[in-house]
Image (spheres, helix red, strand yellow):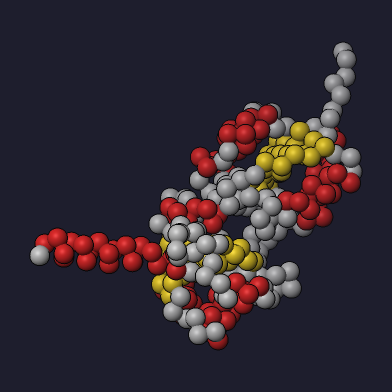
């Protein structure tokens, strides 16, 4: 019997924000073909049902501030399974190139002669529209800042103060542990009354979203028991729903008189 030559390939695939139906068509087809899937904590496990019966599915997740698989171990697993199985899918929540370390894994694979592919995913901030929060809105916000709330050394990104100088929407990933520092930064710049929202488990049935003002974020998070995984959105777009309601009430009053 002729031996089948194994071609080592790594596919770094974005699983989307949570709802399994938000994966791309290309990603869906890839999951059906994979020999091995190395999947993250934030990738919806329902996506694993798409795979063929012979596909090996291995959890390599990293729970926030909890148990995790070291990145070095993930690299070794990528190397081992691509050379022994062939087509390996690295399934990561959201988009792997937005605070996802996906490119680090691609670099590692290329250094070891592994052919690489990237399939983008919908990042969690794009699910904000499900809560009537557009990331941009004409005459309100003409740009977006995406910032990590916790840098490698555990500190808050200094880019936040730069972002506050514009009218752009500020989206903070992995910021729940720094929510007090975020609020303090806005208060220092007299921007505490800026509209804000916290969205937890975006796009999933148990999604939570609470809106308010930046100065109240710690209290809001505590009252509604909001924690990670969540994104924080700061800017006038987070208050558009309230403005729309006021506008509609005024219109209704005018029409009735």
Does residue 163 appear in this view?
A: yes
| 175, above or below 10, in the image | below
Provide residue 38's location: percent of width, then percent of height: 71, 44
Q: Quadrant of the N terminus?
A: top right
- The residue lying at 61 percent from left, 63 percent from top is 146
Asked whether residue 219 appears in the rendered view, the answer is no
Looking at the image, which residue is at 67% across and 41% down? Answer: 119
Looking at the image, residue 100 sits to the left or right of residue 188; the answer is right
Quarter residue 238 falls in: bottom left
Q: Residue furthest left?
A: 257
Residue at 51 percent across and 40 percent down: it is: 21
Q: Is residue 187 above or below residue 225?
A: below
Q: Is residue 255 left or right of residue 144?
A: left
Residue 101, horizontal then vertical, whole percent? 73, 55
Q: Residue at x 86, y 24 (%)?
A: 5
Q: Position of residue 106 (x, y in %)?
A: 79, 47
- 166 shown above or below 206: below
């Amino acid at each position: 019997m002729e031996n089948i030559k194994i071609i080592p390939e790594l596919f770094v695939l974005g699983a989307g924000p949570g709802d399994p139906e938000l994966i791309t068509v290309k990603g869906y087809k890839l999951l059906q073909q994979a020999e091995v899937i190395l999947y993250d904590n934030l990738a919806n496990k329902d996506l694993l049902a798409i795979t063929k019966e012979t596909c090996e599915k291995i959890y390599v997740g990293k729970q926030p501030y909890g148990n995790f698989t070291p990145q070095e171990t993930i690299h070794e697993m990528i190397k081992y399974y691509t050379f022994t199985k062939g087509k390996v899918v690295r399934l990561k929540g959201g988009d792997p190139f937005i605070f996802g370390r996906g490119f680090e894994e691609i670099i590692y694979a290329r250094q070891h002669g592994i052919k690489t592919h990237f399939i983008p995913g919908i990042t969690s901030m794009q699910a904000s529209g499900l809560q009537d929060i557009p990331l941009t809105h004409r005459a309100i916000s003409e740009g977006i800042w995406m910032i990590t709330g916790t840098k490698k050394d555990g500190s808050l990104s200094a880019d936040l103060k730069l972002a506050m100088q514009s009218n752009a929407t500020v989206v903070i990933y992995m910021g729940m542990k720094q929510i007090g520092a975020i609020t303090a930064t806005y208060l220092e710049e007299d921007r505490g009354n800026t509209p804000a929202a916290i969205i937890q488990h975006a796009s999933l049935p148990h999604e939570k979203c609470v809106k308010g003002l930046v100065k109240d974020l710690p209290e809001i998070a505590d009252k509604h028991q909001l924690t990670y995984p969540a994104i924080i959105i700061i800017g006038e777009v987070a208050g558009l729903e309230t403005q729309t309601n006021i506008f509609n009430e005024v219109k209704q009053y005018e029409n009735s008189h």
